[in-house]
Image: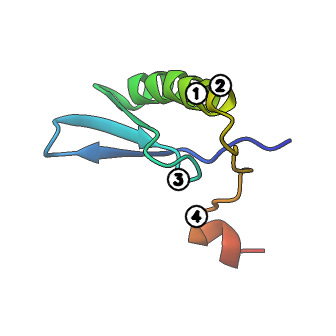
Amino acid sequence: MSDYHINIFYSEEDGGYIADIPDLEFCSAFGESPEGALLEVEKAKEAWLEAARRGGKPIPPPRYRPVIYQVSR
């Protein structure tokens, strides 16, 4: 099974890095470095999935891919 795509970008407004998982609505995290944001979003992903399982909510399959992967072959 493939895993979820993670975006990481610097936010001037927040003064640090944001990591988000587009397939999991509202699943994002902050870090002072890209690596820190990645570690935090991995924790957020596990919490998101656990909450969905406990709540009987559907877990979306990994689908999101940036445009660059969709057009290059």
Q: Which mark is residue 24?
A: none
Mark 2, residues whose alpha carbon is within 10 Å: few (<14), some, or many (≥20)? few
* Amino acid on which disc 3 is placed: Pro
- Tags 4 and 1 touching, CB below 8 Å: no
Distance (Cα) linking label 4 and label 1:
26 Å
Q: Which mark is residue 66?
A: 4
Mark 4, residues whose alpha carbon is within 10 Å: few (<14), some, or many (≥20)? few
Name the residue: 16% across, 35% down: 15
Distance (Cα) linking label 3 and label 4:
10 Å
**71 vs 52, nearest the viewer:** 52
Name the residue: 23% across, 45% down: 11
- Please determine whether, in this image, residue 44 is positioned above or below residue 62: above
Distance (Cα) linking label 2 and label 1:
5 Å
- Please determine whether, in this image, residue 59 is positioned above or below residue 38: below
Viewed as shown, does residue 32 lie left or right of 50?
left
Residue 43: x percent and y percent? 52, 21
- Tags 3 and 2 touching, CB below 8 Å: no
Residue 46: x percent and y percent? 60, 24
Judged from this view, the residue extending furthest toward the front is 56
For label 2, the residue is 54
- Asked which quadrant contains residue 13, the reply is top left
**46 vs 9, nearest the viewer:** 46
* Amino acid on which disc 1 is placed: Ala
Mark 3, residues whose alpha carbon is within 10 Å: few (<14), some, or many (≥20)? some
Q: Which mark is residue 51?
A: 1
